[in-house]
Every structure is written in C-alpha cells, then in structure tokens.
C-alpha cells in the first residue's frame, strides 16, 4: 500500500507465484555464475601454461636448428678431411705396390653381377681373419669411374657355411637373408666414395661350430640396382 501526497492511498499486490519464480531464478543464477567464473579462470590458467610450453618448445626448436647447422658444418669438414686422407693414402699405396693393385682389379669371379665394362666399383685386397668366435672381413672398395665422380649406395657382406642343411648364413650389417641376398638392400652399410674406401665387416658366429666357407659382397646403388656382386672362397 502506497500513500500519496493528496491523501489518496494506492495499493497493489505481488503474485506469490512471481516471487517463487524470482527466488528460483536467483538460486539458479548464483551457482551458475560461480561455475562460469571458475571455468573462465581455469581456461585462462590453461592458456597461460600452454603459452609458456609453446614458447619453450619454440626455443628448443631454435636451439636444435642451430645445433643441426653446426653439425652439418662439422660433417662437411670431416668429409673434406677424409677425402684428403683417402687421396694421400691412395697415392702412398699406388707408389708402394702398383703391380698388386693392377692385378687385383683384374680379378674376377663367375658370380660377378655386372658386366666388366659396366662396373663402377671393384673390390681389392680382400682378407678374412678368424678371431675365436668372430670373423673379420676387410677389403678396399674402389671407385672405377673416371675423374672426380663419386659413387654412393649400400654395401652388404654375406657369409655362408656348407656343413649344415640348409647352410647357415650370416649378414653384415645384421639382417634377414633370402636366397643368398639381403631381404632389404636399404639395411646395408651406407657409403660414398670418390676414390676408395676401407671396409670392415664383423660376423659373430656365437656358439656355432661351423665357420663360413664363402663370402659374398654385394654393392647396391641408391635405387636398389646391384653394382657389383662377388663371391670369395674362405680357405682354412
């Protein structure tokens, strides 16, 4: 009830139902507001944490990129240094025993994969040493291309016995052998040569009483084509 200045009295009523709905709205609005504010604060904290994590990752990526550049520069320097060493070593070997190098390059076996006129690499001075339960195979891989052309590809050395049935086989680098050839040529030792490269392959015979009776050297180019395949008998 409201009293006016002129003495008139006005009165009005509020519906209990309206009051009930208003009370329910306030009761629902307050907790929902609290939840919304808490959710906003939580999302803001998560955003800040993620922003710091992204900034840290960007810093690590930049440091890794700088380290990669330094590593590439170091690798290029080492490759150039090794190239000079190979050239000096080749000149020393050729001056010391030129007749042996010529004879070894002329060696051939029936297992040569590529025709003689198409060979780009050759194997020289192959030696097999037995060291207890290990076999060490060493040789020199020579680039036959003229000029300063380089040869790159994958190298496999396979050893094979003949006492057991089926014959026991070993592979360097380690891998599965199928019908006398590596299952995946890309598992071989990666090489790049300009003149020649010393190669050593080690085989661990383990508990086997059998020793390899033959050695097969396979040279693949980067597309998987066989550049050279040679078999060598192992003498006792």
Image (tube, grey):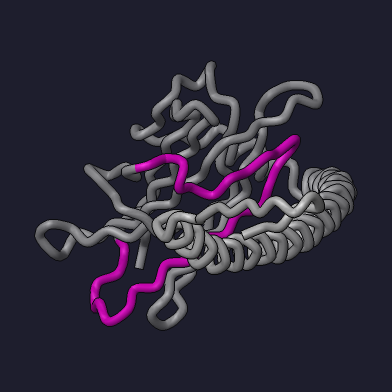
Rendered image quadrant of residue 67 = bottom right
Q: Position of residue 39 (x, y in %)?
A: 60, 63
> Residue at point 63% right, 34% down?
152
**Relative image position of residue 12 (x, y in whole percent):** 55, 52
What residue is rendered at 80% in x and 26% in y?
A: 148
Task: Evaluate whether residue 73 shows in this view.
Answer: yes
In the rendered structure, does residue 211 fall within the stretch colored magenta? Answer: yes
Verify whether residue 134 appears in magenta. Answer: no
Tell me the quadrant of the picture where the C terminus can be found.
bottom left
Extreme residue in the front direction? 7
In the image as oriented, which residue stretches furthest toward the top? Answer: 117
Vertical relation: 19 (above or below) 109:
below
Along the line of sight, the residue nearer the viewer: 171 or 118: 171
Residue 163 or 59: which is nearer the viewer?
Answer: 59
Q: Which residues are magenta?
A: 184-212
Q: Quadrant of the N terminus?
A: bottom right
Is 221 left, or right, of 134 in this rendering?
A: right
Is 160 placed left or right of 30 in the picture?
left
């Amino acid at each position: 009830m409201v009293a006016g200045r002129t003495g008139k009295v006005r009165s009005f009523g509020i519906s209990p139902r309206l009051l009930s709905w208003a009370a329910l709205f306030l009761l629902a609005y307050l907790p929902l507001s609290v939840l919304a504010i808490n959710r906003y604060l939580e999302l803001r904290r998560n955003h800040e944490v993620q922003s710091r994590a992204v900034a840290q990752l960007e810093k690590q990526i930049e440091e890794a990129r700088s380290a990669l550049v330094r590593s590439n520069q170091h690798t290029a320097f080492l490759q150039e240094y090794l190239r000079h060493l190979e050239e000096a070593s080749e000149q020393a070997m050729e001056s010391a025993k030129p007749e042996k190098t010529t004879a070894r390059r002329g060696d051939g076996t029936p297992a040569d994969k590529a025709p003689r006129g198409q060979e780009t690499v050759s194997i020289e001075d192959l030696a097999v040493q037995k060291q207890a339960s290990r076999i060490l195979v060493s040789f020199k891989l020579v680039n036959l291309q003229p000029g300063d052309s380089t040869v790159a590809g994958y190298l496999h050395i396979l050893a094979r016995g003949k006492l057991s049935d089926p014959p026991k086989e070993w592979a360097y680098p380690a891998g599965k052998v199928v019908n006398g050839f590596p299952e995946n040529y890309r598992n071989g030792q990666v090489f790049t040569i300009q003149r020649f490269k010393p190669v050593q392959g080690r085989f661990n015979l383990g508990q086997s009483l059998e020793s390899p009776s033959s050695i097969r050297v396979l040279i693949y180019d980067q597309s998987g084509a066989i550049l050279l395949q040679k078999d060598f008998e192992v003498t006792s």
